[in-house]
Amino acid sequence: MNDVLDVTLRLLIVFVVFLAFPLVVGQTEHKVMAHMQGRLGPMYAGGFHGWAQLVADGVKFAQKEDVVPAGADRRIFQLAPAVALLPYLLVLVAIPIGPGEGAVGQAVDAGIFFVLAVMGVGVLGSLMAGWASANKFSLLGGLRTAAQLLAYELPMLLAAASVAMAAGTVSLPGILDAFEWWWLPWQIVGAIVFFVAGLAELQRPPFDMPVADSEIIFGAYTEYTGLRFALFLLAEYAGIVVLCGLTTVLFLGGWHGPWGADGLGWVWTLLKTAVLAFIVIWLRVTYPRLREDQLQKLSWTLLVPLALAQIALTGIVKVVIS
Amino acid sequence: MPEPTVGAATAASVAAADYFPSYSVVGLLAVVGVLFVAVAFGAGRLLRPVVPTPEKLLTYECGVDPVGEGWAHTQVRYYVYAFLYVIFAVDSIFLFPWATVFAAPGYGAATLVEMFIFLGFLAVGLLYAYKKGVLAWT
């Protein structure tokens, strides 16, 4: 009975985090972007600095008519948002936020492997949307999504493999148990490659060719309205939470902190994740969109060689010290 | 040597006993997720208006009536990248099981040499693609 309660509680917490954190990131993005551009951002909804703006958006989305174009592939079109969203929920369960058994939704033994495999499924949602819409802009967006996935999945895999080599395990809590502070400079190149490749997979600016609004309206999501559109947006922000959480766990030491604060490990995890999420927003405001050929070039001629070099470095250091 | 075999067998059965519960929790979460989406879509159906008109159901192309079909033949220019990706990604997957044991006692130098051979293959492949001009968008 206790086990049932335990599992229920864990699933509930993961689910609440999955719904709440993306909203926090979204609201932060509203305000941070606004202030970086000399605006105020939302100020009315909820009274205090527009804190309820995204709640209001949600209410609006739920009331909007759901239009499925006559020419679209109806079933696939309707399913696509769910396929884009649910993988991030599943990844969240495997991310440890503190030391010990209790601070992870579920310790999955194949950690990194599971996480990368499941995250890869999320992109299928965009591809399904792009194809099923029967819209030329959506199709172009879908093709660009596919191209981006092809280019950036590889450096991400290689950078993650470097951490697995350093820790000698693929389990996420196991990696954190093995973490030492000097891994930070040791794995820094891998960390940057992983983070940049992750941004590209989420199609966040400056890697937002697939949804480039000035060229192809909104890419694969052009035909979507209402709740389904909201789910795609939620998927994007859940993706930010997952990417920042993963970078924290793999490269920044997760719950380890400089003063070895016991019991406060989860604060470190959340703090590091929040800082990374801020950087994601910052990059969006800072950089112009990369063109498709520049995207491919960045990945194949810079990120992949860097990731390979990181693997070589990790291998040499690991063998020398052991 | 019977003892290590027995030990390994117990370890394996313990691992298997851990394996299925941990993934069944993941499976449960997947069920929760599917329920969430189903409830959201169901509730959305009750909340939203349904007033379709032919104009509304038309494919959206910046206000102009669409010409031809959306499912057009397209030249996929990055198919070479796709080949590269498949080759490299399948290779890289094998890094993960190897990564967990390569520095184990008694492996050290040999696995390191193997790693450099592996990286050498990848690097030469990448260099070849680069020299062939495949990595430049055409």
Image: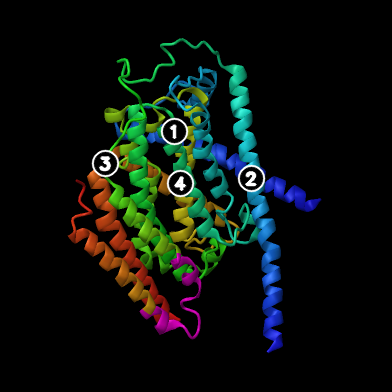
Q: Amino acid at mark 2?
A: Leu
Q: Residue at x 40, y 35 (%)?
A: A29
Residue that appears at 36% across and 80% down: B113
Residue that badge 1 annotates: A129
Give the spatial CA distance, label 3 vs label 4: 20 Å
Q: Which residue is mark 4?
A: A274
Mark 3 and mark 4 in contact? Answer it, CB < 8 Å. no
Q: Earlier in the sequence, mark 1 or mark 4?
A: 1
What SS does tag 4 mark? helix
Figure coloring = rainbow
Image depth: mark 3 or mark 4 in front = 3
Residue B29 has which mark? 2
Tag 3 secondary structure: loop
- Residue B46: quadrant of the picture: top right
Relative to A207, say whether A50 is above or below.
above
Please give the range of residues in magenta: B94-113
